[in-house]
Image (cartoon, rainbow, N blue to C red):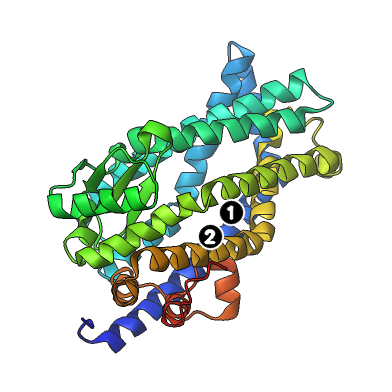
Amino acid sequence: MPYPDQDKLQEKARKYSSLKYGLSIFDTAYLVVLLFLFQGLGISGILARIISGLAAKEYQALPAYLLAVSLAYYLLDFPLNFYQSFVLEHNFGLSRQNTGDWFKDQLKAGLIVYIISLVLFGAFYYILRQYPANWWLIVSLAWIFFNLVMARLFPIIIIPLFFKSKPLSDQRLRQRIMDLAGRMKVKILDVFEIDFSKKTSKANAAFVGWGRTRRVLLADTLKDKYSHDEVEVILAHEFAHYRLKHLFKLILINSLVTMITFYLIFKSSSFFLSFFGLSSLGDIAAFPLLLLYFVAVGVIIRPIENYISRRLERNADSLALKVTGLKEAFISMMEKLALQNLADPNPSAIIKIFFFDHPPVKERIQAALVHTQKIL
């Protein structure tokens, strides 16, 4: 069933998306400027010397430095962050959080990022000092292993920190999803619903976890507004990623990007260290330089990653339609989901290249209309 005032909602989606894209570009540019100034003006070096002088043990310097830098960046980025993730979402009717709950989520997310960063960069500095000749390869393997571990822990540790979940109460829908998993030869622990509606009006569904932690997560904002046919084709798409080994392919791609990034740092960092007047990459004062590498590689590689991801998404759509045969449900689901989440249905080519890791909704619907049950 079409949404009322569909044209108005589509225009609203275009305005929302344009603001999000602009803010994202500005945020990235702002981060680059801050990192460059922090490194180039010697502020990082001063902070590193102060902390090293105060630290009783050498290993205490990194946690203190990371904490100081994280707090400084959060304060400097706060106006943009608050507008982008709170004010804008409320202005477009997408957020249901009050400021107190928003701050709680910010605190939890900040602590998680801090702990993960401490583990990753702690490993980086240790390996760099112990294995100076081939540190880039060992660090890459260590980071890849850590990411695999986090993929397993994410649904059982991280998600519950932000959303409450419970087994899906709709037993007919649960059984339908379990039957679909059986048809597609996907083993899952169970189907859970999470309380998205307490924070947002957006809808989503996911198939997350590894091994025994593998589970289906349905947002209550999706479960309560979509037909069983629509939910089934959504989950068929998620299961298709597993059947087509897309996760494995994405892990390989991300692992390759990680190795390329560290190899570039290994080969070229001496020039940039000299440029900024730094003596060693192992000095925590060079931390902003490391982040500049990650930002630069991320911007350069993003169009390639997005292109690959869009192809995988098309393949998953194709298999989902082949397994379920629910073409009409797929189309109606896409239209409803785009309007509910205020997704830009038909972005410009440049926006698509840099921001879309899924095909735009218009393309996905057109592909469904001419679906030939052939996986590209």
Looking at the image, residue 229 lies above or below residue 368: above
Q: Which mark is drawn over residue 27?
A: 2
Dot 2, crowdedness within 10 Å: few (<14), some or many (≥20)? some
Q: Is residue 27 left or right of residue 174?
A: right
Residue at horizontal 84 percent and vertical 43 percent from the top: 268
Q: Which mark is drawn over residue 31?
A: 1
> Which of the pair 358/105 is nearer the observer?
358
Residue at horizontal 49 percent and vertical 50 percent from the top: 76
Q: Amino acid at mark 1?
A: Leu
Residue at horizontal 30 percent and vertical 37 percent from the top: 189
Question: Percent x, y for residue 6?
Answer: 27, 85
Q: Quadrant of the C terminus?
A: bottom right
> Which of the pair 375/342 is nearer the observer?
375
Question: Percent x, y for residue 366?
Answer: 45, 82
Q: Quadrant of the N terminus?
A: bottom left
Q: CA distance from mark 1 to mark 2?
A: 6 Å
Quarter-of-image position of residue 146: top right
Q: State yes or no: discs 1 and 2 in contact (Cβ < 8 Å).
A: yes
Question: Percent x, y for residue 73?
Answer: 51, 45
Dot 1, crowdedness within 10 Å: few (<14), some or many (≥20)? some
Residue 18 visible in the picture:
yes
> Which of the pair 53/226 is nearer the observer?
226
Residue 41 visible in the picture:
no
